[in-house]
Amino acid sequence: MDPSPQSDHIDTDNSELPQIESRRRLGIAKPRIYTKPLRPLTPESTSGYEVIDWCKSALGWTPLPWQRFLLLHAQELQEDGLPRFRTVLVVAARQQGKSSLITALSLWWLSQGVPLILGTSSSLDTAREVWENAVEFAEDLPDVFGRVKVRRSNGDWQLTVGNRCRYKIAAAGRRGGRGLTAHRVVEDELREHRDFEAHAAADNATLAVGDAQTWMLSNAGDAGSIVLNHFLALGRSGEDPSLGLFEWSAPDGCEITDRHAWRQANPSLGRTITERALTSKLSQPASVFRTENLAQVVAAVNEAVSADAWAACHDPGTLDAHRSRVVVCLDLSPDLQHSTLVAAATLPDGRVRVEVVAAWQSTAEVRASLPGLLARIRPRTFGWFPSGPAAALGTDIARVRNAQGFTVGQTNAICQGLAEFAAAGRVAHNGDPLLAAHVLGAKRLTSGDGWRFSRRDGGHADAAYSAAGAIHLARSLPAPAKLRLITVPENSNR
């Protein structure tokens, strides 16, 4: 679905800009979708001009037109001099020069006294490649960086320059960034993040830094690219003023041979990428070309719930006004390493609101806290799947009041019911990252004449099962009795 942002802070550009050289097709420097500046960009309102000048004079590196656009806009300053954006999301097709841009920007940060830069990627080799480029520049420029110390041992990759500022890299994961206070974070290959653990670990390292920035870079992802899709939707909506989105992508629905669409997704076209090289990639499957070379999200094969449908169901709210009709459902992952309790209730308009109540990392945690949660919530019904991994807690659940176990035959209908309700816009959710990760990461697994949820890459889908079960229970409750108004005639005998 091609976004049509409604926010005044988001601009879209599909216009054909004049070609600089008539015989060479050039990429468009201005992103198709981006967060507009709050005021004219001058040396006083953005540090981008300073970055560009420094890169030219100190590094001998001149940014490409699209990189210049990005630096000027992403480095916009507030009136108080702090960066406008705490988070910057950059999306473009493959091989456009995102890594060279981050290398130069990281070196500028070091020269400006930024104490710690943390670089992460789903592949440590990718983060290390950018880091090694920075090391090479720093070692060749002692007049700029002073004495340089480089550590490459026991997984500790760290560059320290003369002013004691550091550039450290780590593999993206739940431990990456924990225990550190980072002033700049770079998350590369964001499309590969299948849950929020790695992002949360790195990004929260900036929490205590007033002028911190997190840069996230990626080409397009798929339905399982949970973190990328979350921030893309947030950036396109303009709801978060601290998030800057800069998206070089082709519009959905375009032909893969549309040369203008190529220019929109490949801003380095005609400069570092030739049209001939890009044409050769048309031999790939169309879905691959769209993802890699047009920066378009392609629907996953066998996705259980449409990412677009789930995004359309986002509606912030609570279940507080519906506590008397709340139901809950619990499910566990096959490896018993994750469990989720989801609550649901039918709203007056017929939609069903779902909300994650709690999530646990072990069955021991579930046993310890579930009774207290249920005593506080007092759900009308407690649902679970006794034929699945939740059977491990069967003895404990047997003591739960109003427990209802779903049969094997019901499981298909329950999973398909969530997909159908979401497609019809009859689900309401708060955009919970865990729930989104499990629902959008689930695929269809054929079972008899229907299908149920299965997790891509052997991950977890327990929150998806819990949400589906809770929706099923909420829909199954009888409608609340309507009050009847009885009028008694004034002269009637009492």
Image (tube, helix red, strand yellow):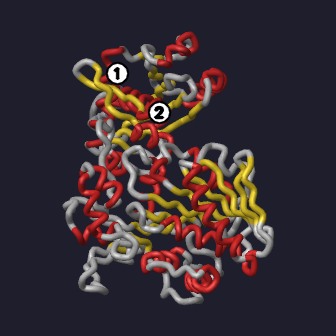
Residue 45 visible (yes or no): yes
Q: Is residue 26 left or right of residue 368?
A: left
Front one among 13 and 407:
13
Residue 46 appearing in the image: no
For mark 2, give the secondary structure: helix
What residue is pinned by disc 1?
411
Q: Quadrant of the N terminus?
A: bottom left
For badge 1, the amino acid type reads: Thr
Q: Position of residue 95 (x, y in %)?
A: 42, 63
Q: CA distance from mark 1 to mark 2?
A: 14 Å
Q: Position of residue 393 (x, y in %)?
A: 55, 15
Disc assigned to residue 336? none
Left or right of 441 on screen, residue 84: right
Q: Position of residue 235 (x, y in %)?
A: 44, 63
| Callout 2 amino acid | Ala
**In which image quadrant can residue 441 be found?**
top left
The one nearer the camera, 106 or 450, is 106
- The residue beneath circle 2 is 463
Label 2: how many Cα within 10 Å (few below 14, some 14–19, many 20+):
many
